[in-house]
Amino acid sequence: MEDSTGRECPSCALPVDADAEECPYCGYEFPTSRSSVKIVAIVMALLLLWPVFELLRYLFG
Ligand SMILES: [Zn+2]
């Protein structure tokens, strides 16, 4: 049985919360950086919204 909301620490094999950046039991730091993922999401959103801003500027500028 695998819990989709959690994951297993590769260091101590204990179930860890999926949102945890490091294992609360052994202190293992998970390689996936949530902050960098967030930055990528923001950049992607800006890239997607940029043509809309340009269009609005073209229409109303
Ligand atoms: Zn651990």
Image (cartoon, helix red, strand yellow):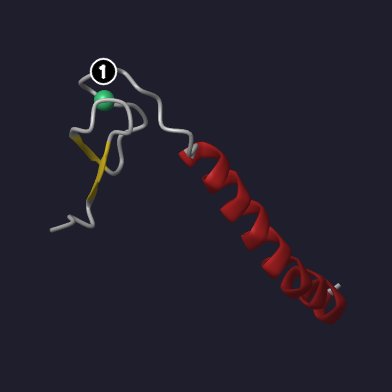
Pick out the residue farthest to the bottom: 59
Mark 1 C-beta closer than 8 Å to ligand 1:
yes
**Mark 1 = which residue?**
26
Examine the image and state in which quarter residue 23 appears. top left
Q: Position of residue 40 (x, y in %)?
A: 62, 50
Front residue (pair 49, 59): 49
**Kind of residue at badge 1:** Cys
Q: Position of residue 10 (x, y in %)?
A: 33, 33
Image quadrant containing the N terminus: bottom left
Q: Is residue 19 left or right of residue 32?
A: left
Q: Is residue 57 left or right of residue 35?
A: right
Q: Residue at x 47, y 40 (%)?
A: 34
Is 50 placed above or below 40 here? below
In what element is the residue under mark 1?
loop
Q: Residue at x 28, y 44 (%)?
A: 18
Examine the image and state in which quarter residue 13 appears. top left
Is 27 placed above or below 47 here? above
Examine the image and state in which quarter residue 39 appears. top right
